[in-house]
Structures are given as C-alpha cells and as structure tokens.
Amino acid sequence: MRNPHHVCRVFGSPWEGVHGTSISSDRHYGRHWHATFGVGIIDEGAQSSASGCGNVDAYAGNLIATNPGEVHDGRPLGGHFRRWRMLYLEPDALRWAVDAASAGAARDVALLRPVIEDERLRRVLGALLRMLDAGSGAPQRAPLDALRCEELLVQVCTMLVARHGALGLPARTASADVSRAREMLADGLAKPPSLGELAAASGLSKYQLLRRFREVHGVTPYAWLLQQRAEVARGLIRRGTALSEAALAAGFADQSHMTRAFVRHFGYTPGAWQRAGVRPGQLQ
C-alpha cells in the first residue's frame, strides 16, 4: 500500500489578514469553506473539486480561486498527488489592496470563476508567493523588500478583481428559515444547541432544517460548527492566544481536537500557523 503524502507550509505576510500556503499532497479534502478569499496556482499535477459553480477540474498552470464562505473540496486528478500554492486574503485586505490602486472602488467583491487561465496574473502571483515564502519563518531567510512586495500584492488583487471578479455585488445572505440556526451555532461553539432546538427556532422539522441548511450553506449544521470553531481558533492564535486557550475558547474539547480540525480544514497544524507569525497589523 502506498504511504500517504502530505507536505504543507504556511507563511505570513507584512499585512493584516494576508497569508499563504504551499502544499504537496495526495489528500482528499472534504467539503469545507474559508472565511477568506483564496487565489492560487496549480504547480504540478491536477485536481478536481466542488465549487459554487459546480464540479471543476484544474491543471498545472491554472489558477484556482474561492470566495469567503464558498464550499469546496479537493482531490487529485489523474495522478497520485498535486502541488499548489495559495494566497489567502481576508475581505478587508482584498478591498484595501484594490482601493489602494483604484480610489473609490466598490466595497463588495466577488470572484466569478473557480478556475482561471491568466498567464500575466499567474506570473505576478507566483512572484508574490515566492517573496512571502522567502521572507517568512526562519530568521536566516532573506528579508522582505516591503515596497516590492506591496506592489505585487496590489497588482495581484487589482488584476484578480478587474479581470475575474465583480464589484458591487450584494453579499449573499442566508435564507431566513436557517439564518437563526446559524446564529445559534455561532453563539454556542462550546455548547451547541441540539438539532431539535435549531429546528424549533427555525420553524422547521429536523429533517427540513438539515435539508435547507445544506442547500444554503453547502454543509450540515455540525460540519458548519466544526469549521466555525476552526476559524475562530485561527483568529485567536493570530492575535497571540496560547494554543490550549484558543482551543477551549473556540469550543474544542482540547488542543488535540483543534489540531485535527486544522489539518482537516486548512492542511496545517495550529503550531505551524502560530510559527508562521501571522499577526494582525495595520492596513494603511
């Protein structure tokens, strides 16, 4: 039997809400979502994944992109593994970079395609990811040229939105009959409500709630809860909270449960995220 292959590196940036990953893996990721925008490059191999536009395939040289909250998965296509790099941007970071290049740009942004063919964008994104990776982590690595790095970030974000996104789109809101259930889950990370309580608050039967919640959010209430715990823990760690304290504050039973959730959803451990030095800063 072939041994599993998964190598993941996470690296920070000089800006709040911006980080990157470099992954080589044969792992099949289950359905999940991120609170950030994501844009990346398939460097080797290929993958098939679910997206907001249905199932899509991406090959070496293609760009891949996700919106905040967009449910997706991922698995190798036509081979044992694939290698890819990603840039993740919190919504405010993407808007900041776009506004920095285009004053008065609209606040609401949505990326329209999960797989993109754009050679110029691929080159600029690749240069940015190489600089961030080289300047992150170990002290012996080359220091970041902050101005050049910021130029690349603004170019990437501006090209991404101008060529492959839309400005001024209304934010997608949850259906009224499940929005209350989602709020209850978010407010009860440590002691979540029962399915019956969620259904009663939504005016639905338990089966109706399960079906409607998955239609709106792409995952079941329990899967959404686990992902939300991981996102909350990631934010706490970024702000300097100790790993064990972040785990409990986010509703995990202990640090090992948090570690398993991080690996499942993000591909890296909480310790790797902490060591990447991803900290909130000031967008200017």
Image: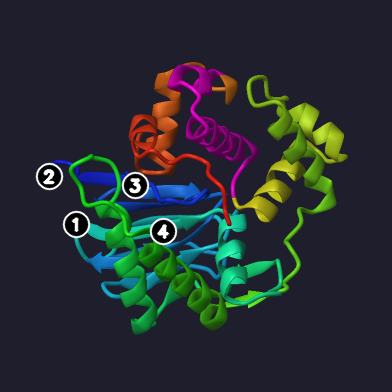
Residue at image point 32% right, 61% down = 129
- In the rendered image, residue 223 lying in the magenta stretch gets the answer yes
What amino acid type is highlighted by mark number 1? His
Disc 4 and disc 2: Cα gap in Å? 30 Å
**Image side of residue 222 versus residue 143, left or right:** right
Label 4: which residue?
87
**Image side of residue 274 versus residue 92, left or right:** left
Q: Quadrant of residue 112?
A: bottom right
Disc 1 and disc 4: Cα gap in Å? 24 Å
Which of the marked residues, 1 or 3, is nearer the chain's N terminus?
3
Asked if the residue at tag 3 contacts the one at tag 1, i.e. Cβ–Cβ closer than 8 Å, the answer is no
What amino acid type is highlighted by mark number 3? Phe
Asked if the residue at tag 4 contacts the one at tag 3, i.e. Cβ–Cβ closer than 8 Å, the answer is no
Q: Which mark is residue 80?
A: 1
Asked if the residue at tag 4 contacts the one at tag 1, i.e. Cβ–Cβ closer than 8 Å, the answer is no
Disc 2 and disc 1: Cα gap in Å? 10 Å
Residue 17, image x and y in percent? 52, 49
Asked if the residue at tag 2 contacts the one at tag 3, i.e. Cβ–Cβ closer than 8 Å, the answer is no
Q: Is residue 62 visible?
A: no
Residue 106, image x and y in percent? 71, 72
For label 2, count other residues whose C-alpha is less than 10 Å away and answer few (under 14), some (14-19) or many (20+).
few
Which of the marked residues, 3 or 4, is nearer the chain's N terminus?
3
Provide the secondary structure element on which disc 2 rests.
loop
Label 3: which residue?
11
